[in-house]
Image (cartoon, rainbow, N blue to C red):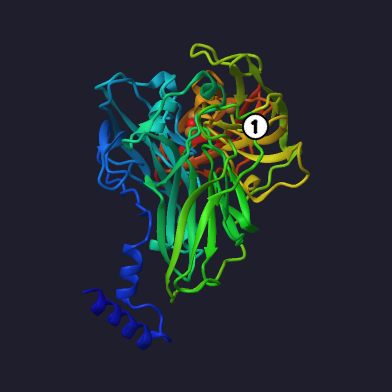
Amino acid sequence: MSTSRRSFCCLTAAGLSAITMTAWQRATAQSVRPGNRLKLPPDWNGEPLKVARAKAPIWPGTLSDVMAINGSVPGPTIRIRRGAEFSARVQNNLDQPLVLHWHGVLAPERMDGHPRDQVPAGQGYEVRFPVFQRGATCWYHSHTDGLTAEQAYAGVAGLFLIEDPAERALGLPDGDHDVPLVLTDKRVSAQKQFVYAPTMMDRMSGYVGGTMLVNGTPDAWLSVDRGLYRFRLLNGCNARICKVAFADGQSFKVIGTDGGLLAAPLEATSVMLAPGQRIEVLVDFGGRGVGSSVMLQSLAFAAGGGMSMGGPRQGSAIDLLRFFVDRDSGGSRLLPESLGEIPRLTANDAKRTRVFTLAMAGMVHTINGKLYEAQRVDFSVPFGDVEIWEYRNTGTEPHPMHAHGGKCQVLSRSSTPFLSPEDTGWKDTVLVNAGETVRVLSRFDAHPGVFVHHCHNLEHEDSGMMQAFMVEAPPTLQIERRGSQVEISWVNSETDWRLESSPQAGGTDWQPVPDVPVIVNGLGVVIVREAAAIRFYRLARP
Ligand code: C2O
Ligand code: CU
Ligand code: CU
């Protein structure tokens, strides 16, 4: 048998020397490939999101204990078109409380997954809200009080992709050339079980694992062609910050961050991706030969702190995913030069500065000297105001700071005069390195109510590095109708409001009302004539 196989090999090789790989060779190459083919999370089909303990085939031939969403780790990928309504039932079939948070998705207060809204084991709740923000790679995960780290680590997380026609029109790589890469790191037992047993030190520095899973796949590889790919990376690790780069230093284009596409692609050879953050990149495999492969890695970097004993350290190197270039590509690799308009906020737009001092206090980390308390609302932000949020990290550990309910743009970073591609565009999670002061321009103009902001190192978050804040509602509108003439008034304040109208109450197509308000007796008043049907009105920030 070995003789006949060898002669077959020789024959084949001789006959094919000038041609690319045959299907047979590809199959052979793949069957001997070390590691596992990259899994892709299933798409959500609208059924209830059932969170339950399960056994998942993470490693071939073994079952690992996880907390799965509809049986899958990561959970199913939710895709919602911009302007459409997201409506789902969350069913907690765990043996502990649960609430899910839609990270990066602008959800109304009661739908956002505030820890106070968690439900006990066995119960469920409905979520329903319109998604009106621009296209973005968002995600969802457990936000249970004190159990976020444990539940997210066990698997309670998935992608939430907002699809946008404006994005589609750009002709970016799509279909099997648009690939999500959810990064999570684990400590793994000899029996191939996830180990989550944080020591005091792990709680202080965050739980870093030495085994990387990409979309739940250990030692993952992906077969690609020589074309252009869009990769959507999510750092779903509890604490590990990744410095994502190709092993041979190949450059790529950063096209998006937390809040969707950038104004234009930016070239990079590595990007920092902290827990909670997303980054979208275009990678061109055209410079590589068929039959070659390259590793995507997280490079080593100096992280400060990282006192973890027994586990891998923050900033240690780890392999993410190997790409095998198996085929030529028929597709185009034309890059759009511009990806769209992003209004650039400046310090002049800011109404005030809010300082958050991040400090180490014994074994925990505080924000402005305090730990999270469910009953306390720490501050209020007027709806729609631009504010400078200044994070001063006086400690020795990095903190990826994340705010619910709004978006921000990075204004400055004390450690460098240059903002890197990952600091560009609309963000919701910003890495604040040890000793650093980072200023961001924040705006909360989606929903009024109480939201939280916190460190996305989940051990830090669970141990209290979180605050609740209130987004103050805009003034209420008084609406008087006399036939088709409608008088709309509100208590005038210093804030400039723009009156908008929509044919639907919970609509996504709000249009500015062109009439300039008159100020009468401390009221802003606008009188409009409704053409055909009744319209609905709201105040928004211009
Ligand atoms: Cu991704 Cu409040 O978190
Ligand atoms: Cu969030
Ligand atoms: Cu932190």
Determine the image quadrant of residue 125: top left
* Residue 135 can be seen, yes or no: no
Specify whether 388 is left or right of 212. Answer: right
Q: Please tell me which residue is depicted at 52% across the width and 22% down the height of the picture.
A: 203
Residue lying farthest front? 3
| Up/down of 344 relative to 172, above or below | above
Specify whether 208 is left or right of 30. Answer: right
Please state the horizontal and vertical placement of residue 188, each as a whole percent of the image: 39, 35
Quadrant containing the C terminus is: top right
Residue lying farthest top? 375
Q: What type is the residue that disc 1 sits on?
A: Asp
Q: Please tell me which residue is depicted at 56% across the width and 31% down the height of the picture.
A: 403
Q: Is mark 1 within 8 Å of ligand 2?
A: no
Asked whether 492 or 171 is in front, the reply is 171
The residue carrying mark 1 is: 385
Judging from the image, what secondary structure is the residue with disc 1 in?
loop
Please state the horizontal and vertical placement of residue 22, each as a whole percent of the image: 34, 78
Please state the horizontal and vertical placement of residue 510, each as a whole percent of the image: 49, 43
Residue neighbourhood size for the residue with mark 1, other residues' Cα within 10 Å, grouped as few (<14), some (14–19), many (≥20): many
Please state the horizontal and vertical placement of residue 516, each as a whole percent of the image: 64, 39
Asked whether 242 or 281 is in front, the reply is 242
Q: Please tell me which residue is depicted at 37% across the width and 61% down the height of the picture.
A: 33
Count of numbered circles in the view: 1
| Up/down of 198 relative to 219, above or below | above
Quadrant containing the N terminus is: bottom left
Asked whether 136 or 14 is in front, the reply is 14
Q: Please tell me which residue is depicted at 60% across the width and 26% down the height of the picture.
A: 307
| Up/down of 207 relative to 380, above or below | below
* Residue 193 can be seen, yes or no: yes
Asked whether 431 or 216 is in front, the reply is 216
| Up/down of 88 relative to 308, above or below | below
